[in-house]
Structure formats: structure tokens, C-alpha cells
Amino acid sequence: MKQFIRDNPTIAFGLGLPLLLVAVFLAISGIPVLLVAPAQYEVLYATHYNFHNNPHNAIRIAVVGDRVQVSYVGNTQPYQTPRLWRFNPKTGAVKEIALPLPPGLAPNSGRPVEAEKTPSVTPIDVPDLAGLRVDSSSLAPDGYRFSSGADGYGGKVFDGLFLGSSRYRVHAELVKDGRSIRLPETEGAYYGNAVRFVGWVLP
């Protein structure tokens, strides 16, 4: 091997440089994990949430004070319903919180209908949210923030250099000072079906 390197320095350099770069980027990406404290707060987020794009005949999730309020706007069944998740970064466990539709909604014919001038709003009782206190601030008390790939470029520098552009790898994560924790069930989100931050679960 030593003789080959001495006889073919250009080839050896060409083969060794990519491996060296891989090692450097892996080392750099691992530094935040060692220096930045793990996330401490559970987070609530919704997927397939398009209320802001279609506020009629849809489930609305809002934080009022420190409580999550879920309601249904309209009187016709929705085209799609959002899914609400509770993620624990300490254990990596994720739980889906069921969002029932109110009874008595008219069938959805699939054809556009004229929106109500004053749409009806029906509160939805969600047992898993009862008594839950949340902080809807963009920054968690431990310094982590919610970031969605739908708002920009996802992925890491390493992915962009060696695996191609990551602009289409849409997902959501918790980030702080270079450390990131990917949120489950958020892969493949796109504009109109984006991941929406709800709040941090308070103890």
C-alpha cells in the first residue's frame, strides 16, 4: 500500500480526499450533540393542517392563553382532517391525539360550494388535551425552537454535498445551536399540507 501511494500520489489523493471530507463533516455534525443539552419539553404539532389555506369546513387548532382549543368551522364534512401529535424528545415516543368531527355535518359532495358569510363554529372536546397547559412561544423554555422544512431548505450540509440537494426533503425538527431532533410523522409534508407548530407542553 505504501509503495502504491508513493508511485501514484495523485490517485491516492483523489481517493483519500473524499474519505477525509466525510470524516471531517461527521465529526463536525457530532459536536452539537456533545455540547448542547438535550431537549426537555414535549411538543404538540399538527400534520396535514391546511386551515389557513381553506378556513371553511375544516378543523381549527388554536392556543388561547395556555390551553389548546379545537373547533370545527363550517357545517359540511371536510376534504381532509389534520392529525395532531405529541412528541417526547426524552424518550423519542410520539402519540397521536384523536380529533373527532362534530356530529351532524352535511356530506361533502366534492363540488365547490358557496361559503357561509358567517360560518358556524363548533367546539370539539378532545379528552387528551383536557388539563394540558402549553406555551405557544416560538422558543421553548430550554431554548429549542420548532423548524419546518416547508419554510425553507431541509437537511444538513453533509446531505447537500454528498447526497444531492435536500430542498425537497421536507420535514420538521427541534433545533438549538446546531443540534437537531427530527420530529416523527412529518416526512413528505408540502405547502398546503404543512406541519404546524402548536405549542410546548408545560409541566
Image: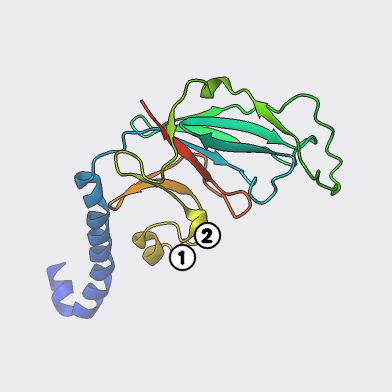
Q: Position of residue 16 (x, y in %)?
A: 23, 68
The picture quadrant where one finds residue 136 is top left
Residue at x 52%, y 40% (from the top left corner) = 185
Residue at x 52%, y 31% (from the top left corner) = 68
Give left or right: position of 76 versus 17.
Answer: right
Distance Cα–Cα, label 2 vs label 1: 8 Å
At label 1, which amino acid type do we have?
Answer: Ser
Give left or right: position of 168 versus 74.
Answer: left
Whether residue 12 is visible: yes
Do the residues bearing badges 2 and 1 touch, measured as CB atoms within 8 Å?
yes
Q: Position of residue 28 (x, y in %)?
A: 23, 57
The vertical placement of 9 against 106, above or below, is: below
Q: Position of residue 143 (x, y in %)?
A: 30, 44
Packing grade of label 1 (10 A; few <14, some 14-19, many >=20) is some
The picture quadrant where one finds residue 107 is top right
The vertical placement of 66 against 54, above or below, is: above
Residue at x 38%, y 64% (from the top left corner) = 162
Whether residue 8 is visible: no
Q: Which residue is mark 1?
A: 165
Give left or right: position of 32 versus 57.
Answer: left
The vertical placement of 164 against 189, above or below, is: below
Which residue occupies the foreground of this view, 131 or 120? 120
Quadrant (top left/top right/bottom left/bottom right) for the N terminus: bottom left
At label 2, which amino acid type do we have?
Answer: Tyr
Q: Which residue is mark 2?
A: 168
Callout 1 secondary element: loop
Callout 2 secondary element: loop
Point out which mark residue 46 bears.
none
Q: Position of residue 81 (x, y in %)?
A: 67, 37
